[in-house]
Image (cartoon, rainbow, N blue to C red):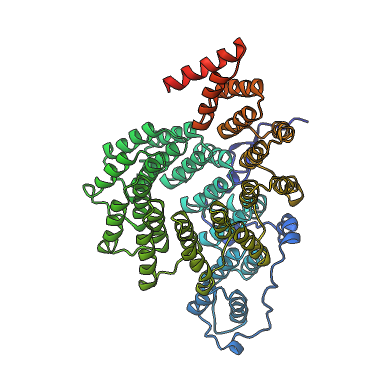
Amino acid sequence: MRKSAYVLHRNGKLIPNDVSFPFVLFLNHNNFSNSQIQFPSRKLIRDSLLPFNRTAESPSIAPNHQSNRMLGFQTDIVTLKRLCKSGDTQNALIMLRDMEHSKGCKLSVTYYNVVINRLCKDRRIMDALNIYYDMIAKGIVPNVMTFRFLIQGLCNLGLYGAAHDLLSEMMAKSGFWNAVTFNVLVHSLCKDDKVREAHKMIIVMDSYWSVYDVVSYNILINGYCKIKRLDAAFSLSIEMSEKRINPDVVTYTTLIKGLCQIGRLEDALVCFGQLRDYGLVPDVITYSTLMDFLFKNKKYDEAIVLFRTIEECKVVPNINMYNIVIDGVCKAGKVDYGEELFRKIPSSGLQPSFYTYNILINGYCKSRMIDKAMSLFMEMSRNKVNPTIVTYNTLINGLCHVGRHNDALCLFNEIQSHGLDPTIVTYSTLIDSYFENEKFDEALAMFRRMECVGLTPNIVLWNILIDGMCKFGKVDIGYEIFKDLGSKGLMPNVRTYNIMMNGLFKDCKFNDANVLLREMMIGGCMPDGFTFNIIIQGFIRCNETKMAIQFLERMLDAGFSADSQTSTDLVNLLTVKKLDDASKEVLIKFFKLASNA
């Protein structure tokens, strides 16, 4: 039988039948009193939570007979809050039970709320519900905070149906609902990617009365921006104005961030301008969001200009903004300006964090200013800022790039003295550097050392090892490692294929290279520009001119360019080989494209 589109609620209003939790929680404004409450049974709620209970057993709730006096606690709300804040939930429960049985102690809803909140944060939702029902049984009426904590606890676990079972009947008879509690639900739904459900809730609520505010809209707009539905996000911002809910800085910042994430820079800048046109002042988060996007898209000059305008708006940079700008200017090659900003941080009443140090150290290393990087590393210790493994990895990589392998190894050996452990990145950096500098034995020794500490190589490290084997003429060993990757649960990526194919072509293993190429294509790993250059050079080296020309044509059709070595090989091919007309046409096309580039 087909369901009716609407159902008649007991207050006489027609409600859409497809409206799910939590709409029914908002349908009555009557004052709340004990006589009005018809709470769902404890069994009903427990039954709805049975699947959850089977997967997440919580510690047993404190027994009634244990005395808090034995623990030496003073039975008051301050002590109860302290226990809950410190995470000592079990003793807080013991204390609450002791207070329940103390004749001289009159408990209010505040005491129960403190414990319910802690239990919900501990994900002990059944224990929180038990306390809730015990409170009701004692005639203590829950307030808006009680329901907010329980709703948050249930939503954090994704138990929306259980929240409905607990609250729908009660909320239909109560007026305990406000925008803050409403926003808990909207936020939880959006966080679980249930943005449309959250939006539907606001739409249906609008037919009855408004319990939402600018925060509700901001949460929903952020939800749509996260799933890249900017059309819906902007529609909501227009709807806000129609309902005379004024967008705030958070609204505009959220939209700017959403536009940035989908690459709409011009629209983001327009939105930024509108913010100021409407008399709002961009805050540090707004500026940081826009500058971060400009730097990431290599709009360095625009980002720096924007940073320099913040003084006019009296926006005080925070450490996150400094990190964004220092990182951006270092990547733009303006390391000196990055250092200047770094030195200004203390005058702003801030202190550089380990992350700030890491950014500038990385900037120095990328610019081959390794002595400055090491000096800043020493400064970290003097300022009692603990280096991280990223700090060490950055410095080791920088030292290797300038040929200071002994210094890199010394730094590697001191990592554990700072309470840190080398990572797969640390070992990969050193092994790659050893291979690059023709230190084959040292590279293998470092690889074995890594295996001894129990680290499992990833595809990046196997690529380094295969490449090293091929460079040292051990192509067969490299090929065996390649073929064994599947047994290690790893899939070759395009770089793995490029390395192996290059090794096979250089070792004149033409047939194996051909087989590998077919495997690559069948496996769905698409060739890149490096692949085409390796194949063309390999076929020319093996005197397979027609195959080389075929792949040159494919490369041009795919929009990739020849590197300098491929270009040289093709010029030589044209001068020393007798080619058919079709091959000549492909080469002419190639040289025309190269001259126009």
Residue 280 seen in the figure: no
Q: Quadrant of residue 342?
A: bottom left
Q: Is residue 283 left or right of residue 569?
A: left
Quadrant placement of the N terminus: top right
Residue lying at 55% horizontally and 58% vertically, measured from the top left: 430
Q: Position of residue 426 (x, y in %)?
A: 55, 60
Using the image as rendered, state which of residue 551 and residue 186 is in the foreground. 551
Using the image as rendered, state which of residue 218 and residue 136 is in the foreground. 218
In the picture as drawn, the residue positioned furthest to the top comes out as: 581
- Does residue 317 sit above or below 265 in this rendering? below
- Does residue 57 sit above or below 227 in this rendering? below
Q: Quadrant of residue 521?
A: top right
Using the image as rendered, state which of residue 64 and residue 35 is in the foreground. 64
Q: Position of residue 96 (x, y in %)?
A: 59, 77
Q: Quadrant of residue 148?
A: bottom right
Q: Position of residue 544 (x, y in %)?
A: 67, 24
- Does residue 527 sit above or below 464 in this rendering? above
Quadrant placement of the C terminus: top left
Residue lying at 67% horizontally and 53% vertically, measured from the top left: 162
Using the image as rendered, state which of residue 296 and residue 31 is in the foreground. 296
Residue 139 seen in the figure: yes
In the picture as drawn, the residue positioned furthest to the front comes out as: 576
Q: Total number of numbered labels?
A: 0
Q: Is residue 508 left or right of residue 246?
A: right
